[in-house]
Amino acid sequence: MASRAQRMPTSLRIASSLFVLLWFILAAFPFLWTVWGSFKVELDFFSIADWTNALTGARTEAVYGSPFTTTGYEGAWIQEEFWRNVLNTGIVCFFVVTISLTIGTLGGYALSRSTYNYTFWLLITALIFRAMPPITLVSGYLLPFFEWNVWGILPTTIIVLVAINQPFTLWMLHSFFKNIPSELDESAKVDGCNQFQAFRRVIIPVMWPGVITTGLFSFLLAYNDFAVGAMLLSESNRTMVPAIAAFLGTTQTEGNVMFAVAAVVSATVPLFILVMFFQRQIVGGLTAGAVKG
Amino acid sequence: MRHKTFLWFFLPTGLAMLLFIAMPIVSVVTQSIFAPHPAVLLEVENCTPLIGCTTETTVDQEATAALRAEKPLGRFVGLDIYFNRGHLAIQEIGQIWAANETWGGFFTELGNLPFYRAMAFTLTFVAVVTPLTIVLGLVIALAVNSLHRQLKGLMIFFSLLPMIVTPLIGSLILFWMIDSRGVIGNALVYLAGDPDFSLKASTGLMWVALMVYGVWHAAPFAFVVFYAGLQTLPQDQIEAAQIDGATRWQQVKFVVVPHLMPLVTFVALIQLMDNFKVFEPIIGFSAQAHAQSLSTFIFYDLGGETRQLSSAAATSVMTIFGVAILLSPVLVRTWRDFKGAR
């Protein structure tokens, strides 16, 4: 426990607590507000008359006889067939994570164990690739993809997302493998393994914490992607985020913003659960890159 | 590791990056120096008795198609696209330069050129959001660190949300709240005392809103990194500073911040890269009338009815150059570290 000298003066303690409270409200309130509002009608969610309507749901009660309604969700999931987009996102995320971890671990391991100059240049190239906005690449994809007739389908998007994901995956896994002492696989090689056997028998069993963390971030990249999906997927193959953006284009004219609100809340729930279960890994991953400074 | 083994391990990921990152860059550069073929026009003279002769201009579909099939890339235009009005606008700048005596007038007119407007917003966003993120992240980290242990976990959980949530979704959530009918928008109307007050109407306020979103989205990252750094803070140094009579502020300034300095550099680097990519908030806030970033500039070129591939490609190439310039100090530093570490 902190010593007496380190204890904060009361005024500072209060100021600090108030600040934390303020940040808590800033961080959490928008989500709680939107979740609450997603069960209301549009006139409550966007209330011109009285903002407390959004809390009590006066108009919702007038229409549906209860302050809560699931019409937004029904409209989004059934009428607009949002479940298709959810399914597409599921497929894209699964394959992106699996493929990019498989090839990323091999590459990251090789980068961490080689001492030649070219590893540096490969890592720097990866860093530049990581810094480029994905949309700059998309304009390069369109023409060839139209030409080869592969535009609009899920596999194309999956491969593109895997590639865009690689620079980050390589950096992350590179630093994880650096922390696994190379004596481990070297002793395996002394015992007669070749490099790949050493990797398979010695490194794979101990690499899972790093791989899981990297996988989480690969998942987030695929799940959060907007630029690639919006440009490379046809309307029937859209993933969630481009679909929500498209919702806004079509639904605002029809006065069904609540569909978009419901879809937004539906798309946030998996992320909420992810943070709940993997908080430690996410924090670890965010700081892992920083350790080396 | 031998070269050959390295090659086999690195081949799959290297191939993916070569085919889908390096090749597209080549493709983008090529596209940016070619423009689509104009349609081949035919002039046909129609003579009708009594009415007289009229010349009609029609598109020769066959010749156009043949030309397009022969050279699918289009016609070579060199750097024309880079210098046209939609991009660097060399000619227009010359005119503006000649017409304006003062710097103020020059910059105002420069701001009317779309590419410069996009660049101005992107650079302002990077310059404002990056330092604010770092400061806010540091303050949150210090405040949360002084909390009771069980509250810390809860705070980290909620703090992560703005960052983890899909950028487009996060910006939509905020956008709905600052809508003049939303809860924050309502409060602003009340504070401004003007029932017609709307964030969406003013360019300046829209810029502020976008930057507030940027800080909100990025602060958790800075917070988590700094918070982790605070856990390794050497207690003896703090105690020594206290014995020397340092005030709390001096302890932060002379012990905590120097200890976190490598992390500040790290966060600044990541934030520079990410803020330069600013894209989703502009889409989510439907702010394209008030603010364009380099990314949305490309997005709208690609997404319109007529896909303006050449124009998008030229902007992409210049954006990539921008990234390279932004990163150059880091690259030099990393090279020195690498040389030193071996």
Image (spheres, coloured by chain):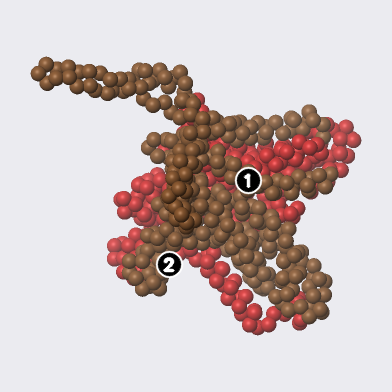
- Residue at 78% across / 73% down in the picture? B238
Colour seen for chain B: brown
- Residue at 84% across / 40% down in the picture? A185
Q: Amino acid at mark 1?
A: Ile
Along the horizontal axis of the image, is A163 left or right of A115? left
- Residue at 37% across / 18% down in the picture? B63
Q: Residue furthest right?
A: A190
Residues marked 1 and 2, same chain: yes
Q: Is residue A200 above or below residue B269?
A: above
Q: Residue furthest left?
A: B50
Label 1: how many Cα within 10 Å (few below 14, some 14–19, many 20+):
few
- Residue where numbered disc 1 is placed: B325
Label 2: how many Cα within 10 Å (few below 14, some 14–19, many 20+):
some
Question: For the residue labelled by badge 2, is the local secondary structure a helix, a strand or a loop?
Answer: helix
Question: For the residue labelled by badge 1, is the local secondary structure a helix, a strand or a loop?
Answer: helix
- Residue where numbered disc 2 is placed: B184
- Is residue B342 in view? yes
Image quarter where the C terminus of chain B lies is: top right
Residue A90 screen position, x and y as percent: 53, 43
Q: Dividing the picture into quarters, in which one does residue B22 lie?
A: top right
Residue A10 screen position, x and y as percent: 65, 83
Residue B28 screen position, x and y as percent: 54, 33
Q: Is residue A1 above or below residue B261?
A: below
Colour seen for chain A: red
Image quarter where the N terminus of chain B lies is: top right
Q: Amino acid at mark 2?
A: Ile
B75, B313: nearer the viewer? B75
Q: Dividing the picture into quarters, in which one does residue B231 lie?
A: bottom right
| Upstream in sequence: badge 1 or badge 2 | 2
Label 1 vs label 2: CA separation? 39 Å
Q: Are marks 1 and 2 in contact (CB under 8 Å)?
A: no
- Is residue A266 in view? no
